[in-house]
Image (tube, helix red, strand yellow):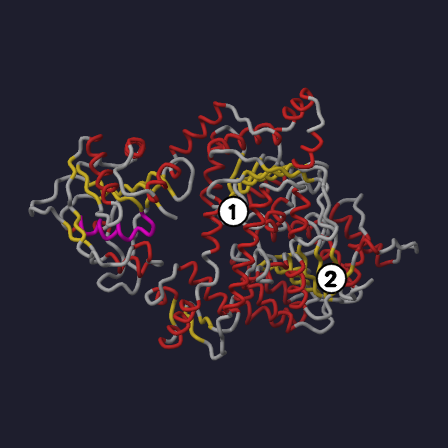
Amino acid sequence: MGNPLSFEPETVEPETVEPEPFELAASRVLRDLAGPKATLRADQLAAIRELAVNHRRVLLVQATGWGKSAVYWIATQLLRQSGSGPTLVVSPLLALMRNQVAAAKRAGIRAVTINSSNSEDWQSIEQLIRSDQVDVLLISPERLNNPRFRQDVLPALAASIGLLVIDEAHCISDWGHDFRPDYRRIADVLSGLAPDTPVLAATATANQRVEADVAAQIGSSTLTFRGSLDRPTLHLSVLQIATPAERLAWIASWVQSNPGPGFVYCLTVSEAERTAAFLASRGLSVQAYTGSTPTAEREAIEASLDDGSLACVVATSALGMGYDNARLAYVIHLGSPSSPIAYYQQVGRAGRGLVHARVVLLPTSTEEEIWAYFASTAMPPKAVVEQVLAALGSSGPLTVLELEAVVNLRRGRLEALLKVLDVEGAVERTGSQWQRSEIPWEYDTERYEQLAAARRSEQDAMRRYQRSPGCRLRFLREQLDDPAAEDCGRCDVCENRALSDMSDAALADAALSDPALSREVSVADQAAAVQFLREVPVPIEPRKQWPRGVVGRSGNIASNSRPEVGRALAFGTDPGWSEVVMPLFSAPDAPPTQEVLVGLAAVLKSWPWQHRPTWITWVPSRSRPALVEGLAHGLGALGKLEVLAAVQRVSVEAPPQSNMENSVTQAANVISAFTFGLPNGEALPAGPCLVVDDSLRSGWTMTVVAEGLLNAGADQVLPLVLWRRP
């Protein structure tokens, strides 16, 4: 067999002896799971034997849809029948947990989950565990960092575990495409297991480097089962479609002509919600599923997918890893993930119980900016990390809010850093406070640079995938170090080689019968998409509380000291107006175009305000004065409104607001930057004031300006900005 820690299923000869009771028992559980016609393959049976009979530590690297979950459900049932304790499954997504609980129940396995969405059930579930009435407990890796779970549940559970399952095990390796620091806490569970407790780590997306890292963390005697990563039912395509409106129109046409069910993946929550709204406006049965979707709605969407009443789900990666629906007929990506390995993971949702499933990638012009944003949330520079550790070491326990006052990091990035430092032992958390631990810790510059380089390499691979002259699936399999990778004969590249030999008539018939071969969209669908994108409202919610640590301001912001809900013309890189607005910020300062003014006028026309503005002012800009003043005067001319310079900048030496990364630094940077009132000392006009600015990110500049104008006598402040930054 060569490497004693590696198992190659293709080298195993089928057994010719009569099935033994173990095989009969395993097959019986499988039929309960998957139906009376289901049969176990030799490689599945071998993995189950190593777990349930030989009590080994096993790493499964097998294709999406291979049946990895069947291995641990069957092993669980066999181990429980032999008197072993319950199985603990660490799983990354709530949708995946619910999917797994449903599958387990089909096999008569008593499965429960403890997660953030069912806190009201925790106590009763813990009692069931203590009384040995649970066969499987599913938890997220974050649960391993919950103080109460670690103190009250985990110690007794670890001592009695019959099988530990680490699902989506690539998350345990920081070389993996979806590393999650809390997965490293599984080491605490491993250290508390009895020596002969079997462990299964399962993933479809581990290259050789990740495979070796995961195996080393599980244990030196880990047995690896690695199989072919081919997906014979998938037909992969890449379509280059020029504009956002055309892409939306193409997706609408696809969903209309393909009964599904299917997934449309988007890179951001806003993109998913917008795409779902457009498809619904075209009369299609569609729902959005993102990290912002409430739990009850998520469960309803999953149920609708299962019963076939929902044609399409527009999702982020919140509905991704491990989700199993045998009837999923297509996966479309509106924008590329930053990693071909992540892409393989997501497209693997399709075609599990079908003979043909379509996978289509629609690259976008903004996807690389989104990649860059997520890359920016990686490990901060050494100086910033040392500043955080120094603050925690010198000032005692601090909350995240208190840390923001001394460290210029966005909250999300600061929280992610603290999680990494906590897992590595450099800091400790007590309640909501963090403090420096006594464990020595050094910033591993070389490793973090290597990880950043690995992420850049993945991005480059995704670019190459889009324009690859070779087989699409072979490319993805080679990225995962699959030694059996070969041309699939089914993707658009492979099919086009065959199509090149067709007659014109046959080629036309092929395009008509398979929309994935055509970029064409109807003029009506494209016009509807353009109109929809231009009319999507971009609200600006007012800040309602000053951040802690800002000198001179504290507590809630009174309703008579804050602006009304405002509006923006464009948000981030969202289609519709962003392609018109964004070039204004990279070009030399100049007055706004007529197209922009007309767009803002349309925003004002659709704004559901209680009282129309009676005058206009603007926020003075150091970098784009012609643009901002031009916006104010242009709108004043269109609406016949008085335009007055009621805000004056006095702090010209302050750092640019764009350099400030969290609420404390952002608010502090602008509190003393302006004075308010008319230069001649006259009173401000009566009626609501429209305050114009070129861009808004945190909202603190507008908060300070609104407070100043209201204190100076303005009746109401209505913010209007050209571009709301993410």
User: Relative to 622, is 52 above or below?
Assistant: below
Where's residue 213, x and y in %?
Answer: 64, 65
Foreground of the two, 171 or 295: 171
Q: Which residue is mark 2?
A: 224
Residue at the far top: name it.
505
User: Relative to 652, is 298 above or below?
Assistant: above
Where's residue 418, x and y in %?
Answer: 46, 66
Residue shown at 32% from the left, 65% from the top: 405
**Element at label 1:** helix
Residue shown at 55% from the left, 26% from the top: 520
Q: Sequence order check: which comes first, mark 2 or mark 1?
A: 2
Range shown magenta: 696-709
Where's residue 523, x and y in %?
Answer: 48, 23
- Determine crowd level at label 2: few under 14, some 14-19, many 20+ residues with C-alpha closer than 10 A: many
From the viewer's perspective, tell me whether residue 377 is left or right of residue 86.
left
Q: Tell me, yes or no, if residue 297 can be seen here.
A: no
Main SS of residues in magenta:
helix
In the picture, the disc for residue 296 is 1
Residue shown at 17% from the left, 34% from the top: 641
